[in-house]
């Protein structure tokens, strides 16, 4: 990789990732020969496919696999008396962790699904020398396997939502009834590596979402936007967190206002900016939108991804993309102490990936009204980091694994002991049936970590990005 090596760099980044380049190469194999894959300090430039205009940074490449036959079922629009047709859902970021599981779930429920993805998440792995614990097939092989098992097709558009020409082509050809937007750079540590990653994160996320809003206005103004936000938008206030809005009485006057946002990384801030842009366009243009402020997702198996190894979902455990519980389970499986950052009182909302897919389906099936900016807090239980460590320790005992815990200096700037009580009733009212951690910890997490423990790269586990040390100089990559 063309990134330079800085010996003082805390990032533990190797130049020859285990399986990353192969999987990316497989994914890219069927793209046009004019594909260029470059490394650059501007990560968003790294994946560029030039077709129409060689000067353009982003791709215009729609790979639409064969169309599915019209099927009816829970994904069908039965509201008109006419013959029902499946609801058409565009899943932006459908090759990622939440997006892949959601795409399969919706397809299984007879929604007509199109995945839009520029595969940049796979490129981040190559760039940083990381890899999913579970081996993941290329997006093309995933979709072919799904079709061979279920006879259901998923449409595929490879490209970048920051490229409005590409997005317009995808919109006008697929004509979605709903767009689920997962397609963002989603790691807080990644956004805190250096200036270029901070800029990339906000550019990719904020401009991508703006493009999606313009595409809806231009090509499908009735289309419902289901946008993935994060519970991290709220921060950790010393009062209860409401679902999007709070009623305040001030100097004798009362109003219901957006709940205050106190994001704690450039990534989380990108989500706050997105929320503001979406809320504005709901008011100004009558867009219908649901902002799903999602908690930390754990687990890897859903009914659909468990059907075949080529459908396996990714499982990130590294210090940059790994989420706390996934990382703890991998640490337990390989005999590495669980790394609690600081005092471990940091409390957040969590949910099982099987509930992510349920929640998204519920949001699509019960769309926001025209002009409505609806906010749901999407998590099922809240835990402190210390509570998670203790749950994993107990689950380890059941498998005969002795689990140690260690406190490491907190690389983040965050309260380590605080009040936390976030409301999360709206999705339950719509019918969400949660999978609770106590029931799934062993099956969905620890056993998977044990199954794939030979693939663990211990070097990737420790935190490598410091909120305080981020600088303008590009953080470089070591072999
Ligand atoms: N995973 C979690 O615990 C979690 C928690 C809260 C919120 N979220 C949100 O859910 C969404 C999905 O998260 P995830 O864990 O699946 O992330 P992910 O990185 O696994 O998936 C994101 C996908 O979007 C694609 N993508 C990124 N930028 C794109 C662009 N400009 N154009 C087209 N595709 C693009 C990536 O290639 C990737 O496949 C994100 O918006 C994230 O912020 C995730």
Image (tube, rainbow, N blue to C red):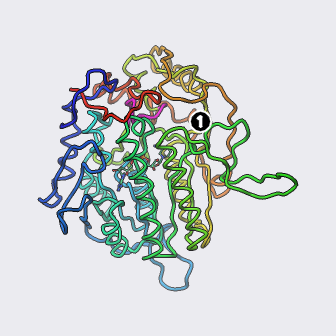
Q: Is residue 317 magenta?
A: yes
Is the residue indicated by label 1 positioned so its CB lies within 8 Å of ligand 1?
no
Residue projecting furthest to the front: 472
Q: Which type of secondary structure does the marked residue at label 1 adopt?
A: strand
Residue projecting furthest to the right: 252
* Total count of labels: 1
Snapshot quadrant of residue 193: top left
Q: Which residues are magenta?
A: 316-325
Looking at the image, which is closer to me, 426 or 207?
Answer: 207
Looking at the image, which is closer to me, 409 or 445?
Answer: 409
Identified at 22% across, 27% down, the residue is 5
In which quadrant of the rendered image does the N terminus lie? top left
- The x and y percentages for residue 171 are 37, 71
Taking the image as shown, residue 91 lies to the left or right of residue 32, namely right
In which quadrant of the rendered image does the C terminus lie? top left
- The x and y percentages for residue 363 are 56, 60
Q: Is residue 266 magenta?
A: no
- The x and y percentages for residue 389 are 53, 23
Q: Is residue 114 above or below residue 228?
A: below
Identified at 34% across, 52% down, the residue is 95
Q: Is residue 434 above or below residue 401?
A: below
Taking the image as shown, residue 337 lies to the left or right of residue 418, namely left
Snapshot quadrant of residue 106: bottom left
Snapshot quadrant of residue 160: bottom left
Residue projecting furthest to the bottom: 82
Looking at the image, which is closer to me, 369 or 309?
Answer: 369
Identified at 27% across, 31% down, the residue is 476
The residue under label 1 is 348
How would you classify the magenta stretch by its main secondary structure? loop
Taking the image as shown, residue 92 lies to the left or right of residue 60, namely right
């Amino acid at each position: 990789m063309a990134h330079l090596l800085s010996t003082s760099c805390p990032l533990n980044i190797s130049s020859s990732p285990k399986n990353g380049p192969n999987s990316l190469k497989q994914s890219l194999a069927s793209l046009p020969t004019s594909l260029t894959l470059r490394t650059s300090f501007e990560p968003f430039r790294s994946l560029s496919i030039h077709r129409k205009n060689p000067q353009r940074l982003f791709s215009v490449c729609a790979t639409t696999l064969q169309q599915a036959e019209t099927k009816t079922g829970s994904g069908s629009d039965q509201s008109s008396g006419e013959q029902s047709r499946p609801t058409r859902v565009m899943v932006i970021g459908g090759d990622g962790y939440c997006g892949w599981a959601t795409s399969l779930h919706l397809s299984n429920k007879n929604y007509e699904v199109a995945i839009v993805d520029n595969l940049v998440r796979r490129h981040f792995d190559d760039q940083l020398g990381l890899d999913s614990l579970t081996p993941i097939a290329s997006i093309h092989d995933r979709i072919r396997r799904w079709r061979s098992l279920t006879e259901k097709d998923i449409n595929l558009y490879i490209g970048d939502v920051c490229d409005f020409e590409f997005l317009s082509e995808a919109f006008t050809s697929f004509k979605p009834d709903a767009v689920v937007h997962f397609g963002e750079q989603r790691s807080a540590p990644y956004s805190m590596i250096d200036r270029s990653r901070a800029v990339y994160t906000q550019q990719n996320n904020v401009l991508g979402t703006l493009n999606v809003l313009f595409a809806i206005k231009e090509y499908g103004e009735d289309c419902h936007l289901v946008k993935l936000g994060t519970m991290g938008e709220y921060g950790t206030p010393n009062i209860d967190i409401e679902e999007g809005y709070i009623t305040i009485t001030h100097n004798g006057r009362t109003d219901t206002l957006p709940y205050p946002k106190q994001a704690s990384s450039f990534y989380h801030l990108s989500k706050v900016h997105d929320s503001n842009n979406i809320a504005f366009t709901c008011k100004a243009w009558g867009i219908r939108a649901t902002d799903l402020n999602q908690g930390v997702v754990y687990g890897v198996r859903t009914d659909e991804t468990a059907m075949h190894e080529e459908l396996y979902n990714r499982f990130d455990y590294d210090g940059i993309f790994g989420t706390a519980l996934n990382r703890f389970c991998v640490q337990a499986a390989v005999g590495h102490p669980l790394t609690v950052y600081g005092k471990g009182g940091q409390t957040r909302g969590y949910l099982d990936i099987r509930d992510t897919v349920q929640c998204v389906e519920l949001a699509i099936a019960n769309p926001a009204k025209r002009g409505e900016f609806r906010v749901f807090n999407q998590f099922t239980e809240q835990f402190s980091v210390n509570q998670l460590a203790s749950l994993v320790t107990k689950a380890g005992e059941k498998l005969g694994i002795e689990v140690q815990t260690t406190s490491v200096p907190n690389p983040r700037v965050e309260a380590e002991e605080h009040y936390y009580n976030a409301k999360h009733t709206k999705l339950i009212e719509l019918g969400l049936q949660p999978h609770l951690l106590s029931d799934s910890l062993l099956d969905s997490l620890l056993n998977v970590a044990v199954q794939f423990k030979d693939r663990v790269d211990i070097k990737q586990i420790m935190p490598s990005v410091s909120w305080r040390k981020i600088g303008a100089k590009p953080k470089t990559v070591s072999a």
